[in-house]
Amino acid sequence: MADLTKALRQLREERSRTQKQLKRLDEAIDVLGKVVSGSGGGQRNGRHGPRKLSVAARRRIAEAQKARWAKWKLKHVKKVA
């Protein structure tokens, strides 16, 4: 019975050492992740979040898209009708 008690104690000590190693590995991974992403954190897959466009830029994009659709419609609607 003493052998089992000793084995149990050794297993618990090994588990404790392993948990400490895992904690250190997690900390190292966090530090390297911050270095790779280039900033302090909150980053997902190295992305910085959605880009912000000004109202004027969105308006120019919308007008350009409307012009493209108008050009496409002129070319294709005449063929159908």
Image (cartoon, rainbow, N blue to C red):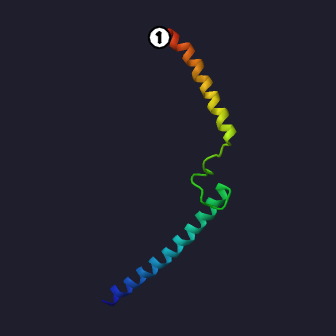
Q: Nearer the viewer, residue 9 or 22?
A: 22
Q: Position of residue 3 (x, y in %)?
A: 34, 87
Residue lying furthest bottom in this view? 2
Q: Quadrant of the N terminus?
A: bottom left
The residue pinned by badge 1 equals 80
For the point 58% across and 20% down, which residue is it?
A: 70
For the point 68% across and 56% down, which residue is it?
A: 38
Question: Is residue 27 shown above or below 49?
Answer: below
For the point 66% across and 43% down, which residue is it?
A: 53
Residue lying furthest left in this view? 1
User: In which quadrant of the rendered view does residue 34 lie?
Assistant: bottom right
The secondary element bearing badge 1 is classed as: helix
Amino acid of disc 1: Val
Q: Position of residue 29 (x, y in %)?
A: 58, 63
Question: Is residue 33 shown above or below 8?
Answer: above
Please give left or right for residue 57 compared with residue 78 in the image: right
Q: Position of residue 9 (x, y in %)?
A: 40, 85
Q: Nearer the viewer, residue 4 or 32?
A: 32
Q: Position of residue 26 (x, y in %)?
A: 55, 67
Q: Nearer the viewer, residue 47 or 74?
A: 74
Q: Nearer the viewer, residue 40 or 63?
A: 63
For the point 54% across and 17% down, which residue is it?
A: 73
Question: Is residue 71 shown above or below 2?
Answer: above
Q: Dot 1, crowdedness within 10 Å: few (<14), some or many (≥20)?
A: few
| Count of marks overlaid on the render | 1
